[in-house]
Image (cartoon, rainbow, N blue to C red):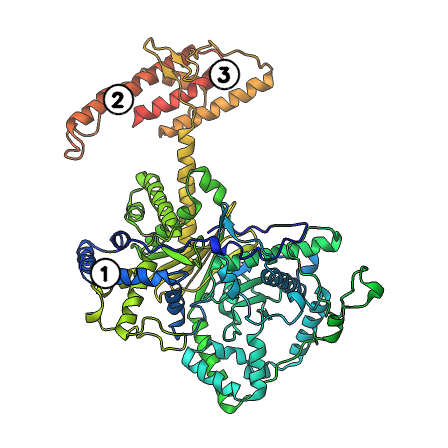
Amino acid sequence: MATPTPTFRLTTPPPGRTFANQHTLPKLPVPSLDDTCKRYLTALRGLQDDKEHAATQHAVRTFLDSEGPALQRRLNEWAQEKASYIEDFWYESYLSHSDPVVLALNPFFVLENDPSPDRGSQLPRATALIISSLGFVHDLRQGLLEPDAVRGHALDMDQYSRLFGNARIPTEGNRPLLTEREVLRNLQAICKDADKTPITEVARTAIGVLTTENRKTWSSLRRELAQDKTNAACLRLINDALFVVCLDDAAPEDLAALCSNFLCGTYDLREGVQLQIIVCADGAAGINFEHTGVDGHTVLRFAADVFTEGLMLLARSINPSAPTLFHASLSPHAESYRPPKSIANGKLPISSQIFSYDTSPSKLMWTLTPSIRVGIRYAETRLSDLICQNDCQALEFKGYGKNFITSHGFSPDAFVQMAFQAAYFGLYGRTECTYEPAMTKAFLHGRTEAIRTVQPESVDFTKCLLNDKIRKLRKACERHVQLTKEGSQGLGQDRHLYTLYCLHQRQVTGNLDPSPDDPIPNRNIQKNVLPSIFADPGWNLLSTSILSTSNCGNPALRLFGFGPVAADGYGIGYIIKENGISVVASSKHLQTRQFLNTLRGYLLEVQRILIQLHRFANERPAPFVDHAGILRDSKTGRPINGHGYGSDESGSDYEDIIQAAYYCLLLAYFHSLDLDYHPLSLIYVEATMSAAHTLPDLPYAYDGLEPFISRQIMELHHKKHHQTYVNALNAAEASYAKSSTPKERIALQAALKFNGGGKSL
């Protein structure tokens, strides 16, 4: 995923620029049905055995020969009238589920700590985030935000219109009514009042917990709430809010508790909440958002800008001329507003004198009937059950990150995706369906396409032996990069086939263009009326993501995570940093901690192998022995025995260092030959080298390894290749015997070690 980067401007940009590129964006293309089916079969090949895959191939052929082309033509007609052919069905996929959104639909971001000393505690941190968020809202609604772009290509900005509350801020130009100091005072007053409220009373009146019920229960309770005028006014006020600020009284002790807290720890939601800013008692802050209308990239832009603006607030407190990220000046209706000197006599405009807004905090008072109180109690019980079913763990891997991965020629995202595959296979001994989103915001109203990480190349990688691991890892990563590029171009299989599936459902129900108030199409269609491709077990297999993953990184974020989408699966959010990798994994009490430990072990092991291969590939070649038996430098070709090596250095200290290093290298060399004695003296070494080496006999016959290795190969390897090591070792030892200085002896140690090891194989 592309990382949004804040843009600083010394002057206010012209309005209307935020959505200026919308009309230039192309529509998401409808892929060819044949190509989609080919991708579908490839994505399933690594998940099925031969018999299962043959059945799926038959189902796909039947689909292409029967219902498929007609559905494709209907989709092409549908797409001509829509900004995006998938958009309506994508919203339906989220809204058709009646289960609670807790854990299932709401991802979270954990922001990096605010480096400002004065904003390390809860209320100052919350204040800075509120002020910065209001600045973001102002620039968004005034059209001043820089449009998103990747490598110079404009991205769709439509999701930003659904990021905040639908109601307009009732002030001139959406400008804020409160200063940072006034917001802080209001938060202090709210906390002071909350501290006076008995915790038992808080529990009895926790209206927010009702929103965690399933849709049918919450809808019934909400209708009952709204029958009271006071309650109805409170609901309207909440639904008009831009976002919700949660001041938690918890201070998580470790990463696991921190992530659980932002995912579901003190969930106090309301219907339609798109965005929550959560600040813990110790000042740790994050964002939780509902996923239906926006994707991670959109909220990531907001999080990055708000975090950066918080830093700029500190800079402006020191230097008022410091650059600004947002351009929201104080509203003329604010109590702290001071008119500019250009206004005569300091009088406000007439329009600013008419309106007055009460900005003091006001507690929402609810009228709770007995049935509502019972509903709160049961909702809290069911929410507690959901939270207790979830296990959330985090890994902040510090061994290496993007810099190391790219230095070895790998795509960072593909490298980490293969790490997930290797860790899961290492823990469970099998490969499961894996999902990663590819952003399609280069198209009008673009959302995401599915990258199905499990491919034949990735399966080969996870199952291969160690000696071929890196080559197959590179091949699997290259395939993943190709899938990512295709997905970002809208050339995947999941979204296309899902749209065809939904169109078929609507045709069966007889309503191709339902309105928002129409009932959701029946999803329990009998198998005998489903097209063959959707009745085949492969469809459910690919639609069940055991590993649901997402890469969402930015310097403003510390951690990112979400709940599992399958009961027996993992939800894995990760951030690839310059020199580290942060991973949050959640599951319904699978081996979450052990999975992360296995992942860490793999990352360290593959690092060791890559470094070893790099050193081997870049190691200085060992000296060689020419046809005359003279040991020569491999780079210059000069004889090593005293020729071409001057003795510029002098002095006893230098000679002592060389001599000590020489003894250490000799000890290491003889240790590599598995000798059961230590050559502690140069005399012993020279005596040992005085005897010529001979070719050792093999402990088995030349044909002893047939049919795996032929007799001819073994005889050639032993009599020719192995003999060469012996000859070279004898020549190196002869040159060593003629050497007269420690420097010459050190130059010979590589040849001794190389050929001595080869002779001993």
Amino acid type indicated by mark 1? Gly
In the rendered image, which residue does mark 1 sit on? 68
Answer yes or no: do the residues labelled 2 and 1 have beta carbons within 8 Å?
no
- Asked if one can make out residue 632 in the rendered structure from this viewpoint, the answer is yes
Q: Position of residue 310 (x, y in %)?
A: 65, 57
Mark seen at residue 743: 3
Q: Which residue is mark 2?
A: 721
Label 2, secondary structure: give it.
helix
In the image, 192: left or right of 234? right
Q: Whole-percent x and y of residue 78?
A: 33, 63
Return the residue nearer the eye: 751 or 95.
Answer: 95
Residue in the image at 69% along x and 72% along y: 186
Disc number placed over residue 165 in the picture, else none: none
**Horizontal and vertical percent position of residue 450:** 36, 56
Mark 2 vs 3, N-terminal side = 2
Please state which of residues 106 and 79 is positioned toward the viewer in this rendering: 79
Q: Nearer the viewer, residue 515 or 322?
A: 515
Mark 3: few, some, or many residues within 10 Å (few <14, many ≥20)? some
Mark 2 to mark 3 CA distance (whole Å): 30 Å
**Precedes in sequence: disc 2 or disc 1:** 1
Q: Residue at x 51, y 66 (%)?
A: 162
| Earlier residue among tags 1 and 3 | 1
Disc 3 marks a residue whose amino acid type is Lys
Q: Quadrant of the C terminus?
A: top left
